Amino acid sequence: MLPAVVGPVLLGSHISTTSLWFTIALLVTTVSHCGYHLPFLPSPEFHDFHHLKFNQCYGVLGVLDRLHGTDDKFRNSKAYERHTVLLGLTPLSESIPDDPKKARD
């Protein structure tokens, strides 16, 4: 909680502003780490890819990752195609499935 507390404490923010900040911070953290792509909420694909490949997708918004090239593997993956706001109830893993694995001999 320390990173979320430092800003409001240093700036002397009002309790209402601080409460709104904590609500948004906890919601974004929950959506990013829940493992589900929920309808009408931001996609967790970028953050999930970061946990899959620890040298990719460091940033919050992706701007610095694009600038420094630390999202190149992500942009070439199926996860990037699914990185959108889900507007229906059909899971994106069904509408944009992973490539079938090649059968081993």
Image (cartoon, helix red, strand yellow):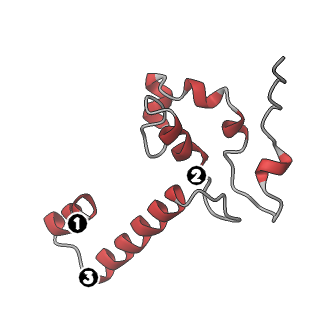
Left or right: 37 as drawn, with respect to 61: right
Spatial CA span between label 2 and label 3: 29 Å
Q: Secondary structure at mark 2?
A: loop
Left or right: 69 as drawn, with respect to 12: right
Residue bearing the label numbered 2:
44
Q: Nearer the observer, disc 3 or disc 1? A: 1
- Mark 3 vs mark 1: which is more N-terminal? 1
Left or right: 6 as drawn, with respect to 75: left
Residue bearing the label numbered 3:
15
Query: How many marks do you count on the picture?
Result: 3
Quarter of the image where the C terminus is located: top right
Nearest to the observer: residue 25 or residue 104: 104
Spatial CA span between label 1 and label 2: 24 Å
Instruction: Return the mark for residue 5.
Output: 1
Give the residue type at disc 3. Answer: Ile
User: What residue lies at 42% left-to-right and 37% top-to-bottom?
Assistant: 58
Give the residue type at disc 2. Answer: Pro
Q: Secondary structure at mark 3?
A: helix
Give the residue type at disc 1. Answer: Val
Q: Position of residue 85 (x, y in %)?
A: 69, 55
